Amino acid sequence: MALQPSFSRLLLLKLFRFGFICSLIQLSDSDPGSFSKECPRNKSTLHNFTSQFTMVQHQLRGVLTVLDDCSFKVSSFDMLPGSDVKWWGAIGLDFDNLTNGFVVSDQKLNQTLYKNDSFVVHLMDNVTWDLMETISVWDVPTASNFGYVILRSNVTDGEEHMLPPPMAENTTLNSSYNASLGLRKPTMFENCKVLSDKYRVRWTLREEDDVIDIGLEAEIGIQEYMAFGWANPNASEQFMLGSDVVITGFKESGMPFAEDYFITKYSECIKNSDGSVSGVCPDRLYGGSDSSSSANNSRLVYGHRKDGISFIRFRRWLTAVDNKFDTPVDANESMSVIWATGLIKPPDSIRPFYLPQFHGNTYGHLTLNVSERIDECLGPLDAEDKEDQDLVIADKKEALIISAGPALHYPNPPNPSKVLYINKKEAPVLRVERGVPVKFSIQAGHDVALYVTSDTLGGNATLRNTSETIYFGGPEAEGVPASPTELEWVPDRNTPDLVYYHSLYTPKMGWKVQVVDGGLPDMYNNSVLLDDQQVTFFWTLSKDTISIAARGEKKSGYLAIGFGREMLNSYAYVGWFDESGKGRVSTYWIDGRDASSIHPTHENLTYVRCKSENGIITLEFTRPLNPSCKRDEKPECNNIIDPTTPLKIIWAMGAKWSEDHLSESNMHSVTSSRPIRVMLIHGSSEAEEDLRPVLAVHGFMMFLSWGLLLPGGILSARYLKHVKGDKWFQLHVYLQYSGLAIIFLGFLFAVAELQGFLFSSLHVKFGYLAILLGVTQPVNAYFRPKKSASGEEMSSKRLLWEYTHIIVGRCSIIVGVAALITGMKHLGEKYDSKDVHGLTYALISWIVFGIFTVIYLEYRERKRRREIVFAKSSWVLGDGEDEDIDLLSPSRMASQMASHSSERMEVQLEPVSR
């Protein structure tokens, strides 16, 4: 918490500012030796005060010593250049106090680069030490704090959690050492050794405390590790085997780590069949389940990632914690040390620890005596790529969600406690394309109004008497999640290459907007976000070819997309970079789940490009829709793209890829959880989902009705009328009404799951028609005319009803079966599941079985009827049953004729009454 100034101090500060403004002193570069003013000596309580600078950015290091009441000395000073850098005083380190601070010296720090420089700085005539609690190196145009010194202990920077942890519970270091390391962000050391052009090691030896503090500093990516340690004292070659090293880096959350490792062979850490481990493994794994935290001979002190430079400070004992995996360091002897940098694989559920990957050519060994004074580091490391912020690339189809959240890693401190987020990323670099509309969904709160400005700081520059050009937004660009404001901005040719998004009311809440000429959205006709919205897929169809691009939305070592429902049996396209930094796109056929199942192919790709911007990989290529080779000739010959059918696409990202000798280290670290079905012609997509339980219940109910109950009811009316009584009729009615009730329930399940009535597919159309025909039957039965009396001719109404009832019933079964078949086909297209294919075959088998059953029953029925007709033609002694006559049978007339003949025969056989 920042110091709350007293009323008298505030009054004094205001009077100073007023006098400073009225004097209109022209600031200029000056020679420290040119000051001739008389200065009261040693009256300030800060006389001889000495402190290291706390680095904030621009790789600032140094030591400040107060000489007297009006001057101080800066020594061992390193700093990358700024634009207009001055010495700055403030009464606190919070955002408001720093931005309301003041210039304390005429001397500017506009030198191109400071390299271990020392000089004296004189305060201005009207500035005293009592006016400030902190002194900073301040870049005025960008309101940036490069580094600071706290002059009084009652001022805090709000980062007490950065204090170094204790070495162990029962370890006590002397007070002087604890005080020297009591800095919250210690970056200064007594010694520095250059390991390579981009890698340094710093250290401070405290032999009386049996510890050494080591700082590793390298120009590497945030996904890379730094390793340093002592080689096996008995090794004369292959120094890494048996070495005791500390692996350092940054977690995905941005927090630093440092852990003790022991190297037994040149490989990743693997678990052997006997439970032991080998390779480059943490010390704690070698002891098995009995290992304790004491196996880690190093303790993290502090780490940061600034200006594209990784810095981590850790502390280790000189004596070995355990004699097997820790190498004791003799402070007075020259010993072999090793170092390396490379990509690192984050922990996963199988191996819950960091896995350093192959270091390539960035490694080495040397002889080092830590007690000797070495200072080879002249000036700070200067990274080519200093931007570590996330990159968000605007898409003309997807709105950018603007929200507000806590400032955790703001790129240009100091900053307010709340900053802008885009798509849940803190103050990222936003990249837009000229001529491409950018949609914003603003929901950062009513006190945050988004605007795009030429001003670096934002917050309405006119209030600071500074001019600015506003390109988009204003007071109306505010909203909340419950009621977001939707706005659109189209950068034009007059928009500069670099502008800034900020809040209109509070400075420094946003960051940079990079405006570039048209890119992928302009080059391709269609684009969709793949699963988890971490990869964007672009394509343009032509007559015989398709042009494809894929762009990751997070930093990675390689980006892969695949055509298929899953990794198994898919065709993959991998964008990666070789050791020379050249981007490449390789093609593969994958028929298994391990590295040995990834087979290179030789597809005919043209217009191939692969590039990386701030770790964001984009791959592009054009390929034929139908390969020219024969299908059985090569696996890639079967990789046919049919624009009329959905293309299933998956993706994966990882730390490292190589063309040959693929291993487990090349496996992905993050992948899509399910495929996306892309309709290439329509330019749309949908997620492939697992079969929903509700739809499964719907399908079962419809099969039970249309496949069992309703056909059973029809068969009972057709083939059971010869059974005595009305059992056939009761069974017919029971099965029909049961089937219709289940159909109604299945229909409700489908409507509830799909959230409405749809007519989009053939299955739905067949289903609606089948239900309509099925519901017609009970209505038809309700209006059934009475049956004619025995011996009477059937009425025309009854005859018409029977024709209608039978035809509608049989048609409903045919349409219902068609709905079942198209339903299974629809499921197969949507889910592409082996279970769906199996159910489809089972349904077809059931239908075929039903057809043969009907043929057999029809044969039996016709045979039975012929026997009845034959019997009646010889021995008829009564009238026939009307219900046992097939209305639609072609032999019906013959039956009727036989019946009339029988009646005549009965008359002829009556005895004559006399």
Image (cartoon, rainbow, N blue to C red):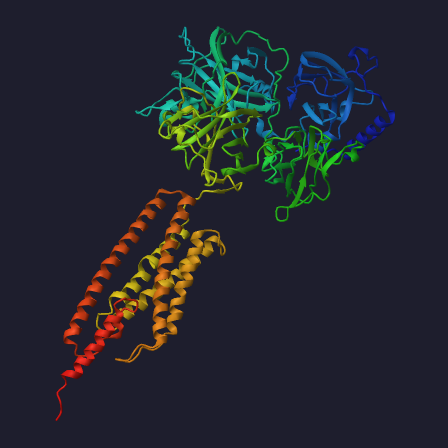
Q: Residue at left 25%, top 65%?
A: 719
Q: Is residue 388 above or below residue 768?
A: above
Image quadrant for the C terminus? bottom left
Tell me which corner region of the image, top left, top right, bottom left or bottom right, holds residue 554.
top right
The image shows residue 735, relative to residue 898, as above or below, that is: above
For residue 896, side relative to residue 633 (left or right): left
Residue 725: tell me if it is visible: no
Horizontal relation, residue 432 to residue 528: left or right: right
Residue at 80% in and 14% down: 30
Q: Is residue 809 above or below residue 560?
A: below
Q: Is there any visible trace of residue 669 in the rendered image?
A: yes
Q: Which image quadrant for residue 478?
A: top right
Q: Nearer the viewer, residue 513 or 437?
A: 437
Provide residue 529's location: percent of width, then percent of height.
Answer: 53, 38
Residue 405: give x, y in percent of width and height: 62, 38
User: 384 and 800: which one is in front?
Assistant: 800
Q: Position of residue 525 (x, y in %)?
A: 57, 36
